[in-house]
Image (tube, helix red, strand yellow):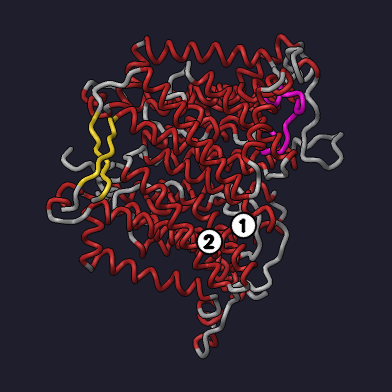
Amino acid sequence: MSLEALIVSLLYDAIRAGTPLLFGTLGEIYTERSGVLNLGVEGMMIMGAVTGFGLTLATGNVWLGILCAAIIGGLLALMHAFMSITLQANQVVSGLALTMFGLGMSGLLGKAYVGIPLPCPLRSISIPVLSTIPILGPLLFQHDQLIYLSIVLVPLLWLTLFKTRVGINIRSVGENPATADALGVNVYQVRYFCVFLGGFLAGLGGAYLSVAYRPAWTEGMTAGIGWIVIALTIFSMWSPGRALIGAYLFGGVEALQYRLQPLGISPNLLAMLPYAFAIVVLLAGTQETIRKRMGAPSALGIPYIRGEK
Amino acid sequence: MRPRLEIERRLGTSRRIMLLASILSIALALLMIALVFWGYGVDPIYAYEKIFVGSFGSIFGLSDTIAKAIPLMLCGVGLAVAFKALVWNVGAEGQLLMGAIAATGVALYVFPNSPALVVIPSMFAAGFLSGAFWGLIPSILKAKLRANEVITTLMMNYIASNLVNYLVYGPWKGLKEWGFPYTDKFPLSAWLPLLPLGTGRIHYPTLILALTLAVLTYVLVMRTKLGYEIRVMGENPDAARYAGMSYFKTAMLVMLISGGLAGLAGVGEVAGNPSHHRLRYPQGISPGYGFIAIIVAWLGRLHPLAIIPSSLLFGGLLVGGDAIQVSLDLPFAAIGIFNGVILFFVLSAELLMRYRVTFKWRREG
């Protein structure tokens, strides 16, 4: 393989491996922008994975599977929303509970799917004309539709967050809910919506894993991706554009890991790479946030109670 | 007309309400899980009967329950201290594994031919230090670089787990194990003595250690100046700062305790659990004690002594989980449903303790 082809294939895999992270991070950015911390991404993602796989297998319609996976993700997120917004419970613990629940439930639901191949996975399509461009063609224009969707979502969610009324409302609720409330924004409604959206996108990311990336179901197949999403959200400084960079960077580490294995390095040591890298990314993100004085949404993790400071 | 929740803050929470809320939350959680069983096509009454009989119904079950409560108690007490200071250590699982690695190193490579009186204390000391070391890394990153400890401690779990795998598949792979990912068995001098009760799995030195440390931790948190600082840090970080308390010092202290106790739990598992006496792949050593301990700590309302009964309850749940896995052909992961749902309910019960909730019908308008 020529060096050029090697690099193209590495970057191609980086995009594929980074896509579930991108979906998850975009969702968590909206959740946290509205002032809610949802540590249940791992649980919502794996429930998305098992739902997407199971329904695709049962109906033969991969899009139905993907849609239901996203809805399940959203519904699970509503559990967290109820706990953290309505009951004002501790958000860290509620998110952990959601992850435990999702991991357990997916194990129970997915028991029948272990070892079964998916007959109709989501396949890559070549976009006519564009896919024949040298280098860029095979790198960018020979993916499946979910990858294109995730890429389209980046500018869309960026514009919504920073250039529309809806986005201003979301950010104001996350920064200063009392003021937003006084200005007539329904704090609870905005937060519920954002948490739901976060779960919806995490579910999509999970479905991508089980119907497109590696079309099969294995217990615990998310393997910490949902936690890396939390680190990436900080790295992204709560902006969809930087989420794309972070997600593909991570995808690259993942892709690199499989390419280093034949060199005789222990696969167990290589398997530590993404997690160690997550810590590095978190540190980098945190330092930059401090340097630019652009911290997390001020009300992140704090329940809003009308009439109390 | 629509229903409306009216919420007003309680002035204080009595012990009776706390206990009541805990019992109520577990009862509701079990009811909820019964629905899951039922939806899955399993008779919930049969399942609960299997779980209860398997875990508390006989001296055999009870001894297994106590054996599994040991690591939960150690991790849970440690986590309670960390959570009290609002240091979100979710890395007990990794800290436990690091303790197990240290004990294995001592038993197989440092003191392979020494008497028990030397080996066993050395294993516990090494395990404590190793677990504490693993916890202090995220703590330093948090205190000095403001890195979110939820993420760092979690990532350290995955790293520790891969480190165990690396050792048992690589340099520490047993010479007599024919391709299994195990180390060699520990020499007899490194085996913790067992209580001849039931299935004989209670390694009592670790149990005594766990109970003693629960009491000592209680004294530390509730009766000393250091404990006072830990509590102020958690309840009112601004006040702590104004009073000149050092965040760095407190964060280090709680992680030292939290990581160290989890490390001790790891020592108990590899050196005490009679089905181990060696290091093996991580899921073999711990079915997620470090994570379940989060619920144990929370159910015990972060009170070191309340964690003793709370860890017994979850020890029983783990044993019962094994029982339904065999008799109902359910995957072990299903136990995660119990964990998640119970934690949800325990958490929502807190609302009942902090607030008086009344349900009112109110006219729209």
Task: Read off the residue under disc 2.
Answer: A251
Which one is in front in this view, the residue at disc 1 or the one at disc 2?
2
Rendered location of residue B221, percent (x, y): 40, 15
Residue B101 makes an appearance in the image: no
Relative to B236, does residue A288 appear above or below in the rendering? below
Amino acid type, mark 2: Gly
- The one nearer the camera, B246 or B15, is B15
Which image quarter is the C terminus of chain A in?
top left
Relative to A251, does residue B82 appear above or below in the rendering? above
Task: Tell me: B343 left or right of B272.
Answer: left
Q: Quadrant of residue B11?
A: top left
Task: Read off the residue under disc 1.
Answer: A257
Residue B238 makes an appearance in the image: yes
- The one nearer the camera, B35 or B352, is B35
Rendered location of residue A65, percent (x, y): 55, 67
- The one nearer the camera, B330 or B83, is B330
Q: Are marks 1 and 2 on the same chain?
A: yes
Q: Residue furthest left?
A: A183
Task: Tell me: A121 left or right of A290.
Answer: right
The residue range painted magenta reads: B268-285
Q: CA distance from mark 1 to mark 2?
A: 10 Å
Q: Quadrant of residue B151?
A: top left
Q: Please tell me which residue is depicted at 62% across the width and 62% down the height of the picture.
A: A54
